[in-house]
Image (spheres, rainbow, N blue to C red):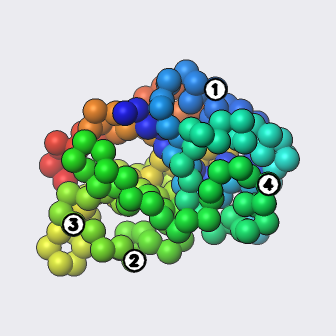
Amino acid sequence: MKLMIASDIHGSATYCERMLDAYRREEAERLLLLGDILYHGPRNDLPEGYAPKEVIAMLNPVKRDILCVRGNCDAEVDQMVLEFPILADYCLLEMEGVTMFATHGHVYNPQNLPPLKEGDILLNGHTHIPACVGIADGNGADIRYMNPGSVSIPKEGSAHSYMICENGTFIWKNLEGEEYMAWKTDSRF
């Protein structure tokens, strides 16, 4: 299965449209959103094209393709207008023998790890900074921490970006589809 992973749309119709264009171009089977869908949050400036109602109108037609976890800017009122579940704190995905713990990152993150096993992957958004690093959990297990960066408000000079997961390979791309980082699950953690 080909999975596209994105995070932190923050109500930007401009970047949501570009993300969905990339999703169609990638021909992925599912779109995993790591939270912060509609609201920009009190610490962020308004993103370009801030129009949450337009984002709703773009995402609801592809609801059958979307898997989503709750970000710190997502609320029950958002769930009232989005036609796919957004309020789960995390989800577990098993792909090609690897377990991925997908969450936004404001609760579980490299500083507060969920219970993971050797070789598991922690997927977060929240920081708006792409990442792919091996970390030890304190109990001797090596896990992989990954972050796709942000669709609409990238930080620390990073690109507006997303990730693709297919055949045990994770690829980070900007919204134009240009690859800038990759990691294979058979690589050393």
Report the residue marked by disc 1.
21
Q: Are marks 4 and 1 in contact (CB under 8 Å)?
A: no
Q: Which sits earlier in the primary sequence, circle 4 or circle 2?
A: 4
Give the residue at x 57% y 44%. 66
Q: Which sits earlier in the primary sequence, circle 1 or circle 3?
A: 1
Q: Amino acid at mark 2?
A: Asn
Q: Residues within 10 Å of mark 2 (few under 14, many from 20)?
A: few
Report the residue marked by disc 3.
117
Query: Which quadrant is home to the N terminus?
Result: top left
Taking the image as drawn, is residue 48 in sight?
A: no
Q: Residues within 10 Å of mark 3 (few under 14, many from 20)?
A: some
Of tags 4 and 2, the one toward the viewer is: 4
Residue 183 or residue 4, whichever sits in front: 4
Q: Which sits earlier in the primary sequence, circle 2 or circle 3?
A: 2
Q: Amino acid at mark 3?
A: Lys
Which mark is drawn over residue 81? 4
Disc 4 on helix, strand or loop? loop
Give the residue at x 27% y 68%. 116
How far from the left and from the top, in percent, is residue 43? Answer: 72, 67
Q: CA distance from mark 4 to mark 2?
A: 31 Å
Which mark is drawn over residue 112? 2
Q: Residues within 10 Å of mark 4 (few under 14, many from 20)?
A: few
Q: Going by the image, does 167 lie left or right of 160?
A: left
113 relative to 122, above or below:
below
Q: Are marks 1 and 2 in contact (CB under 8 Å)?
A: no
Disc 2 on helix, strand or loop? loop
Give the residue at x 79% y 66%. 77
